[in-house]
Image (cartoon, rainbow, N blue to C red):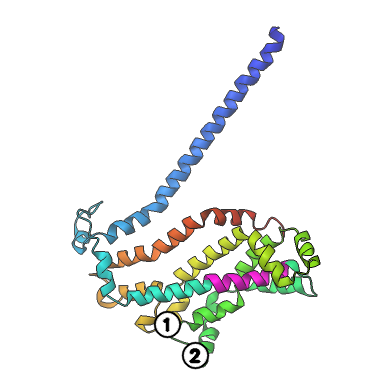
Amino acid sequence: MSAVTAPVGGTTIRSRRVRSIRGLVRLLTYALLAGGSIVYAIPFFWMVRASVMSIGMFFEDPPPLIPNPPAFENYVEVWNVGPVHWWIANSVIVSFLGVTIGTLVSALVAFGFARTSFPGSRVLFLLVISTMMLPQHVTIIPQVILFRELNWLDSLLPLTVPLLGGAPFYIFILRQFFMTIPTELDEAASIDGASRLRVFWTIIVPLSKPATATVAVFSFINHWNDFFFPFIVLQSADRLTLSVGMRWLQAGQYEAQKLHLQMAIAVVAVAPIVVAFFLAQKHFIRGIALTGIKG
């Protein structure tokens, strides 16, 4: 009887040890993640804290950890130091068009690469992907010359019209995801008389919400935060995007005595990105996880 129960007891002890080790590893993992989150959250906390400080608090030694009283009027005063409403409107226009047009065009191109086969399709796809290796700074001069000849400088056209060509990175993400969808669905729809465009719109798009959400979030963040190219092509104060307008606010007479307002507008600039990520977090993470399963 003891020869039968001894192994069971030994197995139980080993199982408890394994569970204890797994629990310890999980605890250490959570501790590391929490510690890393705190480290990355410190700059954000500092920015929010500084945005509700009066200008006098910046020069206290030491500055208060938590402003008392908080100067929430900074968020009202910042609207009076420049055309902030135009900066936000321009950024919203560019970001909205980037998300809608850029995502739609990239999805159409990715659908062509994933669902159709024609001579040279693989070479053409590699050519599109290879453009990601080309730094933006290499093509900036030809682009500026082109837009100058078109009389598009100091307008939003250079930031929106090129969206009609899609984006190589988004094309790659969507193409990889489309290839994970069974082709039998396309064939069944084609037998029922559905066109290629209808297959794309009624089958591929509804099944690709994670990848589409991933591309949309990436597109929104990139266009909302874009500084270099808008800084080159925009000059008038009322035509700047928010990221370039923040730089304008830092220049000249606003550099030293407007630190609290700079932090307030920085919070305004970051808030939409944080909200967009949390709203699309589930689809975003799932899209990243599933992209590239089939190549």
Magenta segment main secondary structure? helix
| Structural distance between the alpha carbons of marks 2 and 1 | 12 Å
Q: Whole-percent x and y of residue 200?
A: 69, 68
Query: Quick one: 101 or 65, which is closer to the camera?
Result: 101
Judge whether residue 25 can be spotted in this image. Answer: yes
Q: Secondary structure at mark 1?
A: loop
Q: Residues within 10 Å of mark 1 (few under 14, many from 20)?
A: many
State whether residue 117 is above or below residue 27.
Answer: below
The residue sitting at 46% across, 81% down in the picture is 156
Question: Which residue matches tag 2?
Answer: 148
Task: Give the camera-side residue of 45 and 275.
Answer: 275
* Comes first in the chain, label 2 or label 1: 2
285 shown above or below 234: above
- Which residue bears the numbered disc 1? 234
Residue 41 image point, x, y percent:
39, 52
* Amino acid of disc 2: Arg
- What numbered label is drawn on residue 27? none
